[in-house]
């Protein structure tokens, strides 16, 4: 890197803007594979692990420990408590660093972020 040149910071991502394809009835629908590929790209860009929640066994005891209103307010789900005390969560947009810090402050834990699609996070938060 040249002297005085700042490293490039990735731009925030609009994860709520789905990648749509035309449906058979003329309505747009989200192609799940396109959404997964997009989330994988976001994970690579922010150097986070991508997690496919379709094949992940959620730890339901974590859902009892974390206030549901936080999961809905911040669009995340808890994945696991690590042996070092950190909490691993799945979010769709790892560029929201202030939000991630706020989650950690409210829960009193350091947060390890993993990326999942919003379409997978939303139904996983429901009991």
Image (cartoon, rainbow, N blue to C red):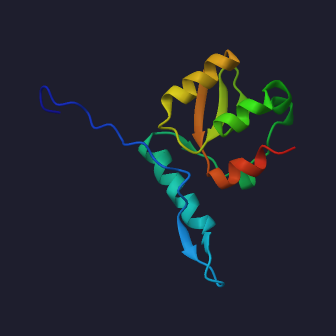
Quadrant in which the N terminus appears: top left
Quadrant in which the C terminus appears: top right
Determine the residue positioned at 73% across, 55% down.
54
Give the x, y percent position of residue 96: 50, 34
Going by the image, does 73 lie left or right of 64? Answer: left
Going by the image, does 79 lie left or right of 33? Answer: right
Going by the image, does 35 lie left or right of 88? Answer: left
Give the x, y percent position of residue 39: 54, 53
Task: Let me know if residue 74 appears in the view.
Answer: yes
Is 99 rendered above or below residue 10? Answer: above
Going by the image, does 87 lie left or right of 59? Answer: left
Determine the residue positioned at 59% across, 66% down.
33
Determine the residue positioned at 72% across, 49% down.
122
**Which residue occupies the foreground of this view, 95 or 41?**
95
Determine the residue positioned at 55% across, 69% down.
20
Q: Which residue is at the far left?
A: 3
Give the x, y percent position of residue 86: 65, 22
């Amino acid at each position: 890197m040249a002297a005085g040149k700042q490293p490039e910071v990735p731009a925030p991502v609009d994860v709520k803007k789905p990648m749509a394809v035309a449906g058979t009835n003329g309505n747009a629908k989200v192609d799940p594979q396109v959404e997964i590929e997009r989330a994988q790209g976001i994970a690579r860009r922010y150097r986070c692990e991508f997690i496919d929640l379709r094949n992940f066994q959620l730890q339901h005891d974590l859902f009892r420990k974390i206030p549901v209103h936080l999961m809905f307010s911040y669009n995340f789900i808890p994945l696991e408590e690590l042996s070092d005390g950190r909490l691993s969560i799945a979010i769709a947009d790892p560029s929201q660093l202030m939000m991630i810090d706020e989650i950690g402050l409210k829960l009193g834990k350091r947060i390890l972020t993993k990326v999942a699609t919003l379409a997978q996070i939303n139904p996983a938060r429901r009991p």
